[in-house]
Amino acid sequence: MFLKAFPSVQVLVRHRALLWQFTRRNFELTMKGSHLGLLWSFLNPLLLMSLYVFVFGFIFEGKYGVIATESRLDYAMGIFLSLSIFSLISEVVSVAPTIIISNPNFVKKVVFPLEILPAAAVGATALRFLISIVLVFAAMVVCGVHTTWQALWLIPILLPLLLMGLGLSWLISALGVFIRDIGQLTAFLSQALLYASAVFYSTKMIPQHGIWNILHYNPVLQAVNLSRDVVLWAQPINLPPLLYLYGASISVFLVGHLTFSRLKPAFADVI
């Protein structure tokens, strides 16, 4: 019944072997021609974390201020975790505008399921994200940063982000066929999202009026904040933001699914 209501999801399930093949291809393309290969999947997040920790932690002496005993190491782990979660959405937004238009041969093949192209991009991003999350917990173990069973809440926090990523990928890739300038807009939005998602600061530092009335609707901010709470600070899950995250993700997924389904028949004519 569910699959009949969402034909694009039905396509993904029916062609799951092809989806996995394209996911692997997208993941491997990022390492093609590189001497270090898969090692860059580990080095990139570590290098980015080191850069942001140096700038925001040492130069600007940033802190989340959630616990009184917070150290530079706690702040570093917070940035590492936050950047990993943020990248799950930002990478999708960055590559989505050109997914369809850069594959004209597939678009003109009537039998090819185009829904797979945006979904495979999300899958490749998810694989890179899994590597980052493994590195986060490995770094916490090595550095002696303890966590509790509350960290298991990370799974239900991240699941809606994958759904949102798929919806965004379908939405932006479909619009990118007709609005070629959308890539310039998403590049700016991705950068703006970085600073609007509480990656480098705690939501408690935001005055609970004015700009907060806008920022608290950002589902990525809610996901980042919830993840730090349960993984780093061992705090109980805050259910209202989690429920909002699910609601927002489902809404984005529905909009993306509907947009892609409606515009797909015209792709070949435009390209």
Image (cartoon, grey):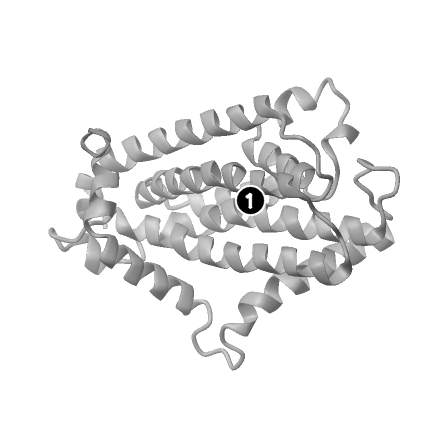
Instruction: Give the image location of residue 168, x and y in percent.
Output: 41, 39
Q: Nearer the viewer, residue 93 or 78?
A: 78
Q: 62 above or below 220?
A: below
- Image point 26% across, 46% down: which residue? 115
Identify the residue position indicated by label 1 in the image: 190
Q: Quadrant of residue 108?
A: bottom left
Find numbered disc 1 in the image and state the secondary structure of the residue it sits on. Answer: helix
Q: Residues within 10 Å of mark 1 (few under 14, many from 20)?
A: some
The type of residue carrying mark 1 is: Ser
Q: Check the image and name the residue furthest to the left.
A: 110
- Image point 34% across, 65% down: which residue? 25
Q: Nearer the viewer, residue 103 or 253?
A: 253
| Quadrant the N terminus occupies | top left
Q: Is residue 256 left or right of residue 146?
A: left
Q: Quadrant of residue 70?
A: top right
Callout count: 1
Instruction: Give the image location of residue 173, x and y in percent.
Output: 35, 45
- Is any part of residue 270 visible from this angle? no
Q: Is residue 55 left or right of residue 140?
A: right
Q: 53 above or below 202?
A: below
- Is any part of residue 260 visible from this angle? yes
Q: 76 above or below 211?
A: below
Q: Check the image and name the residue furthest to the bottom.
A: 35
Q: Nearer the viewer, residue 246 or 214?
A: 246
- Image point 35% across, 34% down: which residue? 256
Q: 87 above or below 44?
A: above
Instruction: Give the image location of residue 62, x and y in percent.
Output: 83, 45
Instruction: Give the image location of residue 72, x and y in percent.
Output: 84, 52
Q: Quadrant of residue 255?
A: top left
- Image point 72% across, 31% down: which residue? 203
